[in-house]
Image (cartoon, helix red, strand yellow):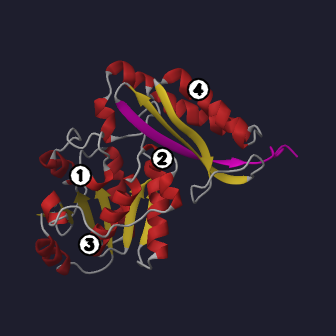
Amino acid sequence: MKLVHDAPALAAALAEQDGRRAVVMTMGALHDGHLSLVTHARQRADHVVVTVFVNPLQFGAHEDLDQYPRDLPGDLAALAPVLHTDDVVYAPSVREMYPDGPPQVQVAAGPVGDVLEGAVRPGHFDGVLTVVLKLLARTRPDVAVFGAKDAQQVALVRAMVHDLDLGVSVVEAPTVREHDGLARSSRNAYLSPDDRERATGLWRALSAGREAAEAGADAPEVVVAARTVLTEAVDAVDYVSLVDARFLPLAAGAHGPARLVVAARLGTTRLIDNTELVLGPVVDRSR
């Protein structure tokens, strides 16, 4: 794999590639979840570009930008077995990405950017979409692969790609989980042993909501089932909600595919997770 740090070096490396290209955008501190995205990218393209950039635009004033884990040598070691010789790792500096400081023109995420994660972290998705757009412009991929754990982000990236005619296929890869269901996340490293054990409450809450849906519960009942389990496990619940594919809230009588999304705090660590489910009457399959 080729490691590059600036746009000219990136352009030179990409010029040596032939065929379809996929990009996986990360903030480093790579784990098996990130590596699974690379595997999905490999299945859809001839070449893979992995970006490693901690984007300051998506962090709020009191969030963990300075403490966010950074370990480029470790990231390169993790990527070495899954990247090919002509694949590229693009690890720009903040000055390289934003030479004049925060860009004067940024992407506005719109109404969906103001709910759930956007309500808890105002401006977060504007920062995410701005850096995603810049990285798409620099890497020029056919495919961009994102993880399902960040489902609201994926929905907004898809909307941006569609609305701005970017011509990139956005792929959502399944969440990679620990043996006890906890979604892999760079922020899991912040958890104390006790908080790590309690963090399984996110997955147990999602499972309770999905089981309620399978038993015929409507949207409010599914939310209550999930919230009850989550509240008992964590220090604070930020939200428990059912949304459609565009991340719009579902009405009480809604039927069909939906996504149950949760966010919670354990100690000083904030975690998110989600699962897909189907709302509707129970089908008797014995007949």
Mark 4 or 1, which is nearer the eye? Answer: 1
Within-10-Å neighbours for mark 2: few <14, some 14–19, many 20+: some
Within-10-Å neighbours for mark 3: few <14, some 14–19, many 20+: many
Between 11 and 80, the one lying in front of the other is 11
Asked which secondary structure carries label 1, the reply is: loop
Q: Position of residue 92 (x, y in %)?
A: 16, 61
Q: For the image shown, how many numbered marks are present on the structure?
A: 4
Q: Of the residues shown, which amino acid type is indicated by label 2?
A: Ala
Label 4 and label 1: CA atoms lie apart by 33 Å
- Disc ID at residue 119: 2
Q: Residue at x 44, y 72 (%)?
A: 161
Could you tell whether 278 is left or right of 205 in the image?
right
Marks 2 and 3 close (CB-CB < 8 Å): no
**Earlier-in-chain disc, 2 versus 4:** 2
Question: Magenta stretch?
Answer: 269-287
Q: Of the residues shown, which amino acid type is indicated by label 1?
A: Val
Q: Say above or below: 189 vs 167.
A: above
Q: Of the residues shown, which amino acid type is indicated by label 3?
A: Thr
Could you tell whether 207 is left or right of 18 in the image?
right
**Earlier-in-chain disc, 4 versus 1:** 1
Which residue position holds label 4? 229
Which residue position holds label 1? 54
